[in-house]
Amino acid sequence: MRIAPGVLAFSCVWGYIFSDPEVRSLLESQIRHILVVRTDRLGDVILTLPVLAALRRCYPEAHLAMLLRRYTGEIVEGNPYCDEIIWYDGPARPQPFLQMVGIIRRHRFDAVVVVHPRLRLALLMAFAGIPLRIGTGFRFYSFLFNRRVYEHRREAARHELEYNLHLLSPLSCPVPEEIQQADFGVVVRAEEDERAAALLAESGISAGESFVVLHPGSGGSAREWPDRNFATLAMRFGTERVVLTGSPGEESRVEAIVALTGGMAVSLAGRSSVKVLAALLRRADLCIAHSTGPLHLAVAVGTPVVGIYPQLIPMSPRRWGPYSARSRVVVPRKPVDCSECSGAKRHRCSCMESITVDEVYDAAKELLSAGERQRAGGGRGG
């Protein structure tokens, strides 16, 4: 994105004016409207939702809004901590810059937390006149933020969810070092749960019947385990019912995996909205997936998960793993700097192929056994 010299000059002056400590202190005492910005993928948005819960604790009377893309916004609808969703995009593409500036300006936000840093977003918040603008300190455009947090996320020193919460430090919003249980605030309505039940019934799975969800795709966001391994894994469950899910466009891939199982698994790929998928995952005993949105969605609705991850530091489970005590992570027994996995995301990765079906199945059975023990003791299954 090219920036005119006049725009840069204006932004520098703007940033200087609102960097005065006394002005910022005054603004902090008058914060009534806060915007949280996360305009990327589903998993990223889910891992940002605890920011809303933390802000609600710190500012119980504030109006909290999120700036989102439409395809991820559904998961925030009904969230008890979010008062409003502002759409970043129109039907096909981001809304024009000046139009977006006008939309944000009309809300008269006192503060914004830009969780997903991009130049366009930083410029939008400055031009919209938001007095307190919080973002990373490590981008060339970070001068557009007047409160900056200095953490290199690519080093994976902590989890993405924790990085997101650390952005609240300029708002004097305390975040505990050890977060025992994240509050995602995902709400599944009765009609969405009924639709999930109907899809399962159509696949021969009755109400209350145990089943496991496998989600073999990642939309290109993760290193992937081979499809044949997912098919073999599905057959290992024997009498345990197995449901394969997938995003729109992944139907043929998932059907091919189902065919490899000889019909022992069923496909619901492309047949549910995000919220119906949440309802489906909430009913499952376990979800097995890569580092992708549905895995984090399963965590958000309280379902145990097994995550299959590479050892590359930027993609590692330390940063992107399931944020749940009821989870297991399986990684390759190969070097962290494996050159075979350092290129394009979608090429064959021998490191991921080195993860055996037995390793994943053993992790799954461990969680399923723990769930059975919990149910026997009168607790919730999983």
Image (cartoon, helix red, strand yellow):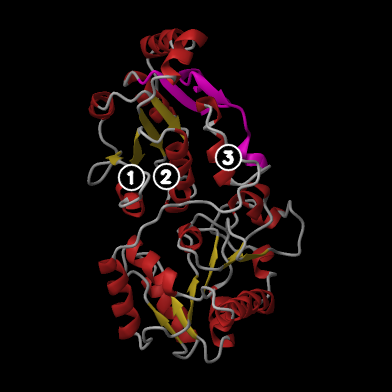
In the rendered structure, find residue 24 and report the number of the disc placed on it. Answer: none
Looking at the image, do the residues carrying marks 2 and 3 touch, with CB atoms under 8 Å apart? no
Q: Which mark is residue 69?
A: 1
Looking at marks 1 and 3 on the same chain, the residue that comes earlier in the sequence is marked by 1
Res 68 quadrant in image: top left
Residue pointed to by mark 2: 40
Whether residue 231 appears in this view of the structure is yes
Which one is closest to the eye, mark 2 or mark 3? 3
Left or right placement of residue 304 versus residue 63 in this view: right
Whether 376 is drawn above or below 247: the answer is below
- The earlier-in-sequence mark between 2 and 3 is 2
Above or below, 327 relative to 209: above
Magenta segment, which residues? 130-155
Label 3 residue SS: helix
Q: In the rendered image of this protein, does residue 54 appear above or below residue 354?
A: above
- Tell me the crowding category of disc 1: few under 14, some 14 to 19, or many 20 or more residues within 10 angstroms, Cα based: many
Q: Are marks 1 and 3 in contact (CB under 8 Å)?
A: no
